[in-house]
Amino acid sequence: MSEDPIPDQPESSADSPSPTEPSPPVTSTDSQSLPESTPSEPAPIEASADSPSSDGSSAEPASPELGENRQPIVSVLGHVDHGKTSILDYIRSLGLERQASVMAREAGGITQHIGATEVPADLLNDTCAHMLRGGKFKSPGLLFIDTPGHHSFISLRRRGGTLADIAILVVDMMEGLQPQSVESINILKQLKTPFVVAANKVDRIHGWESEYGRSFLVAVKDQRREVLQEFDKRWWKLVGQFAEHGFNIERFDQIKDFTQAIAVVPCSAKEGEGIQDLLAVTVGLAERYLEDRLRDTLGPAEGTVLEMKEVRGLGKTIDVILYRGELKKGDRITLVGQDGPFQTHIKGMFRPRGMSEMRDAGDRWDDVDVVEAAAGVKINGPDLENVLAGTTLRLSNTPEQAAAAHEKALEEARIGVEIEEEGVVIKADTLGGLEALAFELGKLDIPIRSATIGHVSKRDFITAENAGQPLHNVILAFSTKPLAEIAILLDDDDSPVKYIDGKIIYHIIEQLSEWREERTRQLEEEQREALVFPGRIQILVDHIFRRSGPAVVGIKVLGGRIHIGQHLMRSDGKRVGKIKSIRTGESGLQEAEQGAEVAVAIGGATVGRGIDEEDVLLVDIPESHAVRLRNIKLDSTEQEIFDEIVALHRKSDRFWGY
């Protein structure tokens, strides 16, 4: 068996990464040679008994003693709709325990919750047989973490990235790096998580001939020259984009040093091409460079809480990725809640059957008594409703374990949604959903007054109804519904609370933005109706219908607006009368806007004594209204008239309108 699990991999040098914390790749592509249009066949990828340390020698056992190899935890990240879930759907479709598509059941085809899938070693070995050439992986399988791609799920992706031993960054070969791709790269860079790039949708290159399930190494040899030229065009665009963010990339079959460049595996989730290459490279890298991390399984159990959700028949449950130790029914555990650390016990544990996805397993769960790392497991027990997703579960059977777990949990207790005295109400079916919704609202500077999981309750309705600002009389619900009696109140056309729900967060945000714009417009209209706005009119020549008692004249509104009940003044600041009526033809009006020619009756005015033909008159704004108008957006003409009116008044009162 070969000593090297990676094709064409030289012995590790002093600059190579340690098994527990791989160094980031170099940031310059100057030293990289151009890839050939067709690759050479790589050396077989095999399991290695030895893993190189940072000084090139075999790694010494760490202290404490290391256990047996656990399966690597692989986080799948990338931009929305670039194919993360599709890749996993293809993998789940393999073997005797194949599962149906998860993406087909996702709202809008977009992953909304973090999930996990276990792929057994025998399936990996069978799928990657072409790459292994008779060799076998030593890992007992792979544990995939599928993270939402939409940008609002940065908190979920951060949890998945932190938890992962290695990551797969999925990039659409046709679109290249997109905003969430870059965001994912930054997360991986920050967390020092090694990763492989899956350049997905290679089948969409014009003229590409696909064959279901074959290796990319075989597929690329069957393509016509003009197709390979188009492939190279896309490839070099991708190389440039990664270089802009400080990363060298090379095609996995042409890479010389995996510590100096990021391996890229072109593939097609739709056709299954290149997926075996992707699996082989991912497992091979993990087994070679992360052996100490994968064997760090001894000691009190620890795991990451992905989600807290309510399941019919089980009550409140938590989905956990166990990465160290083992858990048994009845074990005491320490968790992090909204009010800090707390202890509870495990009542039941359930693992998804076969390769079922944790968030989508339905009734495909096996009741288990013991779980060993690494594994995805659903746990139920008392007092789980306040658990904060993304925090750590720790075994606490002994006083010593409990004390150590409590101290570490205190450091995590600050995680959560920031609540303010004034703001909107948000609801979700999971804490992860709350975090994602809160993240989006934070970007819009919208405060949150209440954030809880579960159905929308009467308390939520009352909280939203009593908000101090009209734009906060709203409940946002992600993947949850109101209780029956509250649904009736919310459906009422005269409900004081706006209710917006959905299974896709950015749809909720879009609806909220639309409602806020419309509500703002309504509020401004209500305010404008009660305010005296700037206006300028001119008395028309030969349009004197009555000289006094009241004076009735024809006018043109030169700017702004006039309204019944408003006082008028001359350009010298002297008040001349009050508008008693506005008419056009036989119709009476409440107001007239810029450009209108109407007849107005002006009480207290006499034509020839104070006003006359061609005179320009201004609306006389009360000082209290002038103060309020400063907080309302006026158009340019209104602002000009307003400034003129203020200037006239300040001739006699320099602080008028402040």
Image (tube, grey):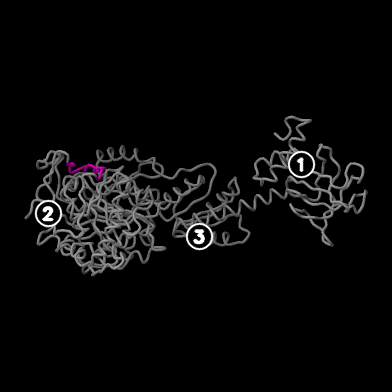
Observer able to see residue 19: yes
Q: Amino acid at mark 2?
A: Ala
Q: Amino acid at mark 3?
A: Leu
383 horizontally vs 290: left or right: right
Which sits in the foreground, 288 or 120? 288
Pick whichever of labels 2 and 1 is earlier in the sequence.
Answer: 2
Pick whichever of labels 2 and 3 is earlier in the sequence.
Answer: 2
Residue 440, which numbered label?
Answer: none
579 horizontally vs 182: left or right: right
Whole-number angstrom distance, CA of label 1 to CA of label 3: 50 Å
Mark 1 crowd level (few <14, some 14–19, many ≥20, 10 Å Cα): many
- Which quarter shows the C terminus? top right
- Please name which of the two marks, 1 or 3, marks the residue nearer to the observer: 1
Pick whichever of labels 1 and 3 is earlier in the sequence.
Answer: 3
Residue 483, which numbered label?
Answer: 3
Q: Residue 115 location in percent, x, y? A: 32, 57
Residue range corresponding to the magenta coloring: 16-29
Q: Amino acid at mark 1?
A: Ile
Residue for point 75% across, 32% down: 650
Whole-number angstrom distance, CA of label 2 to CA of label 3: 55 Å
Magenta span dominant secondary structure: loop
Q: Residue 480 location in percent, x, y? A: 45, 59
Which residue in the protein does label 1 denote?
A: 621
- Please name which of the two marks, 2 or 1, marks the residue nearer to the observer: 1
Quadrant housing residue 38:
bottom left
Q: Residue 416 location in percent, x, y? A: 41, 44
Q: Residue 400 location in percent, x, y? A: 24, 38
Residue 47, which numbered label?
Answer: 2
- Marks 1 and 3 in Cβ contact (< 8 Å): no
- Please name which of the two marks, 2 or 3, marks the residue nearer to the observer: 2
Extreme residue toward the left, this view: 1
Local SS, label 1: loop
